[in-house]
Image: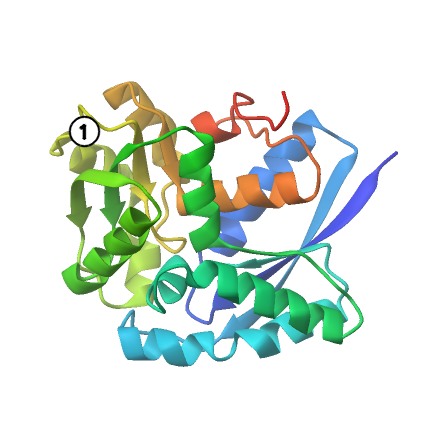
Amino acid sequence: MTRHLRIGQIVPSSNTTMETEVPAMLQAHSHLYPNDRFTFHSSRMRMKKVEKDELAAMDAESDRCAMELSDAQVDVLGYACLVAIMAMGHGYHRISQKRLTECTAANGATAPVITSAGALVNALKVMGAKKIALVAPYMIPLTRLVMDYIANEGFEIVDWRALEIPDNLDVGRHDPAKLPDIVSTMNYADADVIVLSACVQMPSLPAVAKVEALTGKPVVTASIATTYAILTELGLPPVVPGAGALLSGAYVPNA
């Protein structure tokens, strides 16, 4: 039986990547599983500069976005901004997910909510990571905040790179072909997993396979982790060809 599933995303107004990478991965999933069909629906929160105050103001709009997407009776709702969640304090992804799910319930169209922040944390646990290497586009203070959030969830960061791109549109324009050379300068030998993009706006999907081949390490990104969370939340096999180790089929729940 064909399932027609509505994927809702809450995205920063300047985000241009999650509405390309997530649909690309889910459509690739559909090539393997033709009965799984998806449509994509977004609601936007205003944000241009990746700065702590602007991120907090943006997050305050997320309740409205959840209500709007529940009007469309989406089957799952993803909060597609990792740093906005992590900038709000340790463990905030759990608070956000609970509150936004309650918003959809209050509107009579309950939908499970995931966040890219929580999805990345969960993905690292699923992959059995203890130590990670990480690339992020943020300025150094925000990158340190993200690393502290991840460390608080139980992971050690053995090396990292902050690309220091303040404008969110410029983050979306960063060429993913540059990522393998960036990783090649890092000390990743002790890392269990490489987080190639700790940001849903920095394009990374085209570089994942190359970095896995270069390093011999499993690679994950915030958008790959979000896609894994979407598929598992919907009870579908989290398998997408060409999207790295997490979506290779090696981490199918209860497999």
Badge 1 is on which residue?
A: 188
Could you tell me residue 55's position as x and y percent? 36, 73
Packing grade of label 1 (10 A; few <14, some 14-19, many >=20) is many
Residue 223 visible in this rendered orientation of the protein: no
Position of residue 236 measured from the top left corner of the image (x, y, whole percent): 69, 35
Side (left or right) of 177 relative to 84: left
At a point 24% along the width and 44% down the height, the residue shown is 135
Of residue 81 and residue 39, the one placed in the foreground of this image is 81
User: Vertically, is 219 above or below 5?
Assistant: above
Q: Nearer the viewer, residue 70 or 118?
A: 118
Residue 65 at x, y percent in the picture: 59, 73
Q: Secondary structure at mark 1?
A: loop
Name of the residue lying farthest toward the right? 1
Tell me which corner region of the image, top left, top right, bottom left or bottom right, holds residue 111: bottom right
The quarter of the displayed image where residue 218 is located: top left
User: Looking at the figure, which quarter contains the N terminus?
Assistant: top right
Is residue 102 something that shows in the picture?
Answer: yes
**Residue 228 lies in what quarter of the image?**
top right
Q: Residue at x 51, y 66 (%)?
A: 96
Task: Identify the residue shown where x is 59% and y is 26%.
Answer: 252
Seen in the picture, residue 1 relative to 176 is either above or below; the reply is above
Q: Amino acid at mark 1?
A: Tyr
Looking at this view, is 155 or 222 the one in front? 155
For this view, does 143 lie left or right of residue 238?
Answer: left
Quadrant assignment for the C terminus: top right
